[in-house]
Amino acid sequence: MQVLLNEIVAFWPAVLFNLYFAAASIPFGFVFAVLLALGKASTNPWISRLSRGYIYAFRGSPLFIQFFMFYSLALSLNISVWKPMGVSWFVLHPLFIGPLVLMLNTAAYTAEIFYGALRAVPRGEVEAARAYGMSRFQQFRSVIWPNLIRLAWPAYTNEVVFLFHATAIVYFALPVIGAQKDLMITAKEFFERDYNAFLHFSVAALYFLAVTLVVFFLFGLVYQRLMRHMPAPPRLRYAPRWMR
Amino acid sequence: MSDDLAFWLGYLTNGKHLTWYASFQFTIFAALLGGSLAVIFGLIGATLKNSRYLPLRLIGSFYSSIVRGVPDVLFFLFFPLAFEQAVEWLVATQVCTPELIAAQSAAWPPCQAANWYLGTPEYLILASVSLGLVYGAFATNVIHGALRAVPRGQLEAARAYGMSASQVLWRVHIRQMWVYALPGLSNVWMLVVKATSLLSLLQIADIVLWADRLGAPNFLPTVGLVHDDWRWRYYLVLFVFYIIVTLLSERGFEALMRRAGRGILSERTN
Amino acid sequence: MKKIILAAAAVLALSGAATAQETVRIATEGAYAPWNFLDDAGKPAGFEIELGNAICETAGLTCEFIINDWDSIIPNLLAGNYDVIMAGMSITDERLATIDFTANYFPPDPSRFVAAGSDQIDIAALSGKRVGVQGGTIQAAYAEENLAGANTVVSFGTADQAMADLAAGNLDTIIADGAYLEPVVAASGGAIVFVGEDVMIGNGVGAGLRKDEAGLKTKFDDALTALKKDGTVDTLIAKWFEGRGPYFAE
């Protein structure tokens, strides 16, 4: 028991890195995803094609490869672009490029969710808004968006959990700076010291599981708030049917 | 110009590159075996979840929710290690004498005679099994949902024909289930394909490892062509490779769904 | 009945172990030219591969080279996935606590700093710089101990990856084995230069083995002694490390 407690304490600094990666990428990914979803639904064929292609490429390839690709790409642009701009130390830092790639990745998955929700927004409500003489922005703000976010929220919750899980591979692909190590690197290093796979990996798994449950709880609260106008607000369930 | 072409052709077909091309077999093997196992584990999981006995139902639910609560890469690393250690422990209880245990200096295995050597084939199979286990949890939910989506009337009709419970299950329920499960299973397949990029973490010389080694800058003529950092080009190839696999899989599943959906009246409007 | 099955299982396991003993598996990194690398045919090549084959021939062993990432090379040796490490690994007290080494086949060699040719960098008063190392090397330990306070130490999976970041200007300096860096600096045509004072760490490079493999260690050591005496080791060093040696001539 003492061993387990020590282990949990030893992993504490590591989970902060995973939390940071998720927290830094989710808000930007959310905004980017909204733009991508609107782009995909756009009537302009170029904007639509571009958004469609982006979403397809990032959903159709592994995040692991995306990490390697973007790091080496950023590296090859270092001397010609980042150095002259004086942002070299910043751009190639895992704490920047990690969340950046996660953001690019999650934006594609989230955009697909939002796009699906966008198409499911009741047409009648949009027509009513138009009949009221609302501008396009007003239509979006007061009719489309509230519908969209309610429809998309359960699937989006799931995506956030997936993104948090995806933070586990950041340091398998990027260089490690000093003692900045996340849960997986910590577990791997502990394992290589004493071969106790069950202890170290279980504690890492425990952290992931705990954060997963917290995410479901918090996002569930938001969902209930979003659905407060319903007579019996539907509840967000753990392990829903959506997947990436 | 033609000299250039000949040079690049020669470079891209040297033994190192040929080994890289050959290593795609590991990725494809892991995807196919992992995908098939995911369906099998999914069927088992869904059967457990549908079981009449509470303990079995609990095991089914536990499996499908816990495996999904942790990252795939964690389970992917953990399972082969844990399986190896379990086998070694089992062998150790039989072959290790106290002297052998005393002679063992490392923390694991208990004695050297109990050591199980894992080469690429063993790791590849273990990796595929862990892919199957992880994504089997997803398939469990898909198949569980699909089993419930089969219209009640069809099962009742089968029963009215005098089929036994197992006949209803195997001849009607599971066969009809595929139609409803295919969209979800296609999703699971895409996840398995993308997860095959992790093979190099288990010391398998897969496409990712070779892309890194081929792209890494080389300064020494004795080693091969001197070039600077070309890694992003090699990773771009992998990026495109996976997108193409996704594209082809999508086409394949569409054809499969059309075939499976023959004769089924659907309310789909598109 | 149960006893018989168990006995059969034990015999199977033992015979499996016995056949596994016949080939000696040597792990190398394959990304540390000219020590060990993957040649154009995609096969392990380099100083240690030729030396390892010579040792096995002398000792009458059948050997096979296996590629394993550097950062897990000692754990996988201890886990029994191979029997020997020949991967430019320096003999140190920390490593001797977990594994055994043969006598060195490359003498103690200074670790050296390199930087891009255009950079002015003062290694003696290094501060606020980005120092690249390969994770898990003696230089990584040295940097962690002596440089981490005032600088940022960045660890990479392979030495080549660190070189790529240095060449791309993402690192100010790298500390690594002199024998690894010398050919790189020579071939770079002034793009990469040695800077600062050399640091003496490590007790030379040897082959790593598990501590319970005393028999194999003796065979390797005997073969190595013979190869040092007949000049093979020096010949190989001269072949792969230009202008080095002879170190072991009588």
Image (cartoon, coloured by chain):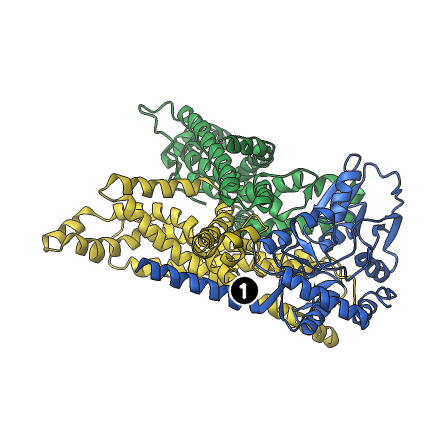
Chain colours: A green, B yellow, C blue
Q: Amino acid at mark 1?
A: Phe
Quadrant occupied by the C terminus of chain C: bottom right
Vertical relation: B110 (above or below) A26: below
Q: Nearer the viewer, residue A108 or C53?
A: C53
Picture quadrant of residue C177: bottom right
Vertical relation: C11 (above or below) A241: below
Picture quadrant of residue A123: top left
What x and y, as percent, mark residue A105? Answer: 55, 44
What x and y, as percent, mark residue A56? Answer: 51, 51
Element carrying mark 1? helix
Residue C60 located left or right of residue C224: left
Q: Residue reaching furthest front?
A: B99
What x and y, as percent, mark residue C126? Answer: 85, 39
Residue B235 located left or right of residue A107: right
What x and y, as percent, mark residue C217? Answer: 67, 61
Around disc 1, counting alpha carbons within 10 Å, would you say few (fewer than 14), some (14 to 19), or many (20 or more)?
A: some
Picture quadrant of residue B239: bottom right
* Residue C250 appearing in the image: yes
Q: Nearer the viewer, residue B135 or A100?
A: B135
* Residue B222 appearing in the image: no
Q: Nearer the viewer, residue B189 or C205?
A: C205
Quadrant occupied by the N terminus of chain C: bottom left
Residue A235 located left or right of residue B85: left
Q: Residue at x 30, y 55 (%)?
A: B178
Vertical relation: B222 (above or below) B73: below
Which residue position holds label 1? B24
Residue B69 located left or right of residue C176: left
Q: Nearer the viewer, residue B175 or B253?
A: B175
Q: How many marks?
A: 1
Q: Chain of mark 1?
A: B
